[in-house]
Image (tube, grey):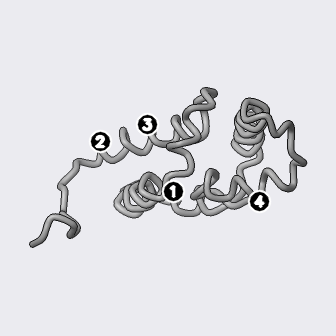
């Protein structure tokens, strides 16, 4: 097994739930603009997908495989703050949502 290969980790359902809650908070509830680096991380998104797939909570995959207007609104606010900080000003909502698709994962945009 080389160092770049995948490794199995055994987690209890309690640990899976705690990690999902932490990632969901960081991505969708945290108002800090700096959290965008984690919101758009392919590695965080991949780990989140695996935690959802490993969960014993029925219907959770359906919950995450839909639109979430309140999370979209918070994400747009965060992205707007980031764009203002970068000096590019506010961007049209449609353009932001297209830009935020990876940030909104696993929710649909």
Q: Position of residue 30 (x, y in %)?
A: 58, 30
| Nearer the camera: disc 1 or disc 4 | 4
Return the disc, 3 or 4, that comes first in the chain's sequence: 3
Instruction: Tell me the element at label 3.
Output: helix
The residue labelled by disc 2 is: 14
Of labels 1 and 3, the one closer to you? 3
Q: Callout 3: 10 Å neighbours few (<14), some, many (20+)?
A: few
Q: Nearer the viewer, residue 37 or 109?
A: 37
Residue 2 coordinates in the image, percent (x, y) = 12, 70
Q: Is residue 18 above or below residue 98?
A: above
Question: Dot 1, how many residues are within 10 Å of its Cα: few (below 14), some (14-19), or many (20+)?
Answer: few
Residue 48: image location, x then y, percent = 44, 54
Q: CA distance from mark 3 to mark 4?
A: 25 Å
> Is residue 8 placed above or below 85 in the rendered structure?
below
* Rendered residue at 19%/56% (across/down): 9
The answer to which of marks 2 and 1 sits earlier in the sequence is 2
Badge 1 element:
helix
Q: Is residue 9 left or right of residue 76?
A: left
Separation of disc 2 and disc 1 at Cα?
A: 15 Å
């Amino acid at each position: 097994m080389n160092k770049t290969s995948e490794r199995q980790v055994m987690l209890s359902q309690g640990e899976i739930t705690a990690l999902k809650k932490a990632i969901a908070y960081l991505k969708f509830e945290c108002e800090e603009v700096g959290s965008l680096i984690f919101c758009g991380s392919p590695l965080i998104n991949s780990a989140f997908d695996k935690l959802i797939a490993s969960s014993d909570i029925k219907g959770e995959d359906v919950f995450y495989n839909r639109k979430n207007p309140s999370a979209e609104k918070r994400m747009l606010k965060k992205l707007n703050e980031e764009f203002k900080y970068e000096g590019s000003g506010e961007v049209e909502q449609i353009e932001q949502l297209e830009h935020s698709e990876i940030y909104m994962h696993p929710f649909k945009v």
